[in-house]
Image (spheres, rainbow, N blue to C red):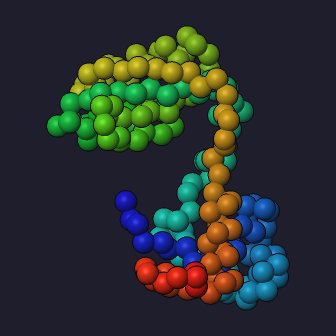
Amino acid sequence: MNSSPVVDATDARILLALADDPRATVLALAERLRLSRNTVQARLAKLDENGALGSFERRVDPGALGYPLTAFVTAQADQHRLAEVADRLKDIPEIVEVFGLSGQTDLLVRVVAADTEDLYRVAGKILDCPGVERTSTALAMRELVPHRLTELLRRAAEKGARGARPSHAGRRGRD
């Protein structure tokens, strides 16, 4: 994972405005933020190119597609076959995300399903993948905190408003 930020304060302001109005045009964003249209366009293009913008798919509710159930499947896999396992999991459309984990569980697989029978079928497909040794499935009962980044974007935007102040260890009463 890349730990260096690609989003500066101006980028964060643009992203906050887009979060507030996802269908805003570049011109509308520019006017709202008092930036030039070219600046907004160039920054959005750079954010997209750098991978800072996720896919539009994140906004689509699986329930609207007929998949109201969400479950999390943890899997233990043969470490030497993780790439093969990942390739096989990509072939299962109901799998919407897969994370490699540290610790006793190797994979966290987010699955959507039409109903419990469908979930049983999908969980079986995961277990059938060569290299998957064991799975455990937990049905999500409800989403308590939805995916969010607004507060982190605000923090990034405020850093620019305050100006970047270096943090110095040992300095008292100044930061």
Give whichever of 46, 106 is nearer the camera.
Answer: 106
The image shows residue 97 at horizontal and vertical percentages of 48, 40
| Numbered disc total | 0
Residue lying farthest to the left in this orientation: 80
Side of 57 relative to 83 (left or right): right
Q: Is residue 35 above or below residue 159?
A: below
* Residue 140 to residue 158: above or below: above
Residue 41: % across, % down: 65, 79
Is residue 65 toward the left or the right of residue 109 in the image? Answer: right
Q: Quadrant of residue 112?
A: top right
Image spot of residue 61 (x, y percent): 68, 38
Q: Residue furthest front?
A: 172
Quadrant (top left, top right, bottom left, bottom right) of the C terminus: bottom right
Q: Considering the image in quadrants, where does the N terminus appear?
A: bottom left
Q: Nearer the viewer, residue 89 or 170?
A: 170
Q: Taking the image as drawn, is residue 41 in sight?
A: no
Residue at the image position 63 percent from the left and 47 percent from the top: 147
> Residue at horizontal 46%, vertical 20%?
137
The residue under the point 35% across, 27% down is 75
Residue beneath the point at 78% across and 62% down? 20
Report the residue that reaches farthest toward the top. Answer: 117
**Residue 73 in the image, given as x and y percentages of width and height:** 44, 26
Residue 52 visible, this angle:
yes
Q: Identify whether 120 is placed above or below 170.
A: above
